[in-house]
Image (cartoon, helix red, strand yellow):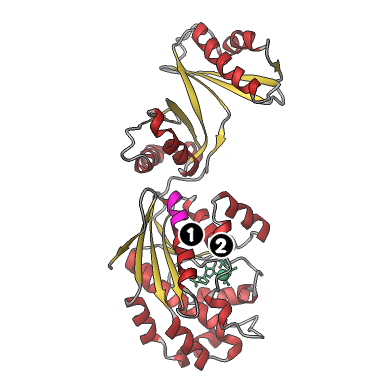
Amino acid sequence: MTYLAKIGELTLKGSNIQEFENLLKHNAAKYLEGTGAKIALRAGRLYIDCEEAAAEKVEFTLNHLIGITGWAKAEVCEKTIEDISRAVFEIAKKEAERGCKTFKIDARRADKSFPMNSYEICCEAAGDVEAIMKVDVHHPDTIIYVEVRERCFVYTDSNTGCRGLPVGCSGKGLLLLSGGLDSPVAGYRMLRRGMKIECCYFHSYPYTSEEAKQKVVTLAQKLAYYGITTYLNVIPFTDVQMKIKEKAPEAWSTLMLRVCMMKLANRLAHRCNAKCIITGESVGQVASQTIENMTVTEHFAELPLLRPLCGMDKEEIIKDSYFIDTYETSILPYEDCCVLFSPRHPVLRGTAEQAEEIYNSLEVDELIEKSYKEREIIKLTVNGEPVKKTD
Ligand code: ATP
Ligand code: MG
């Protein structure tokens, strides 16, 4: 069987297009390793040929592969109008069976040696179908596509793809991944800009439980379905957090937590060659996310701090989390390290100078280094189980 995917934004990329296309093909091949599926890329389309047994895997791939705008299973037939009409009719019957009352044919003739133009193909192929459905060119219940290329492809029901740029074309970002709703969506957003993602989770055992950590492993796994491979660094954070509680003014504790997270993120980002740090912050969502407090956090970041959700509201974020299937996991009720020690009256408009001074008074540099060294690394891939790694 043959599947066809439309390539999106890539077509805008001018002279780099070859590089982007090769990457997209390479990424598709990673998903389909061991399935025997054949992948080809021609004229802005990805073609996947596979055996029936691999169909489910191919469909999973097309639902997760970043860089395509839509996909469909195609009927492949000979380049004669009789065969084309027959294939169109077969598909139309199925569409009528599932309740479609109106249709339209969208024909493209890439092979100009074919004796009929696209309008003529449409008229001829529509003939038989009109016995079972009505033509409606404006709002059809279904569109049947015909493409005359080196072979002829007939398909319908374009499924939407993830769009975006192929993962790997924009370098790597370090995602601060908590168990909440926002950060997985932030990671997905940057994956869609072509970034590879490495994840980092601050774990305050026993204040945050083993279940809370497991939840983050699950979220990282879901991101690996889009990113193909990712690493999750679990950083023991209890000692740092206790030190903050002991030494920082209570109103500053959340902000100091953020600062220490940034310090560790810097360290890790340099180690894993990330070019930026990504968080799930959104302006005004909570006290630590006022623009002033976000500026304080940013002051401590040694790399660009990307916040892809900064202008999104919760509804939009939740919609994305359903789409990437992280919603159910994110809402599991396990405690979050930030909530544990949250002050009753947090500072709303901190300044970098104050933050520097308080941070220095904590004397946590050594603890931070220790946390970094004791981190646990888990590798997650699209096709395998999580695996523990050493640095
Ligand atoms: P989320 O839904 O992603 O948990 P949130 O709305 O709960 O975000 P905060 O708890 O203020 O917001 O966290 C802001 C951002 O800081 C998170 O999106 C995440 O990127 C990062 N972050 C917070 N806690 C952790 C943690 N324990 N480990 C890693 N990153 C974290
Ligand atoms: Mg959170």
Label 1 environment density (alpha carbons within 10 Å; few <14, some 14–19, many ≥20): many
Segment tinted magenta in the rendering: 221-226
Q: Is residue 188 visible?
A: yes
**Residue 360 versus residue 387 in the image, above or below:** below
Residue 339 is drawn in which quadrant? bottom right
Say whether residue 98 is left or right of residue 217: right
- What is the three-letter code of the residue carrying label 1? Leu
Residue 106 is drawn in which quadrant? top right
Say whether residue 276 is left or right of residue 390: right
**Residue 68 versus residue 235 in the image, above or below:** above
x, y percent for residue 302: 43, 72
- What is the three-letter code of the residue carrying label 2? Ser
Is the magenta region chiefly helix, strand or loop? helix
Q: Are marks 2 and 1 in contact (CB under 8 Å)?
A: yes
Is residue 376 in the magenta section?
no
- Distance from disc 2 to disc 1, alpha carbons, whole Å, reads 8 Å
Residue at the location (42% across, 63% down)? 199
Is residue 225 in the magenta section?
yes
x, y percent for residue 91: 57, 19
Most distant residue in the left direction: 390
* Residue situated in front as seen by the camera: 187 or 215: 215
What residue is shown with label 2? 330
Residue at the location (45% across, 72% down)? 210
- Mark 2 vs ligand 1: CB under 8 Å? yes
**Under tag 2, what secondary structure?**
helix
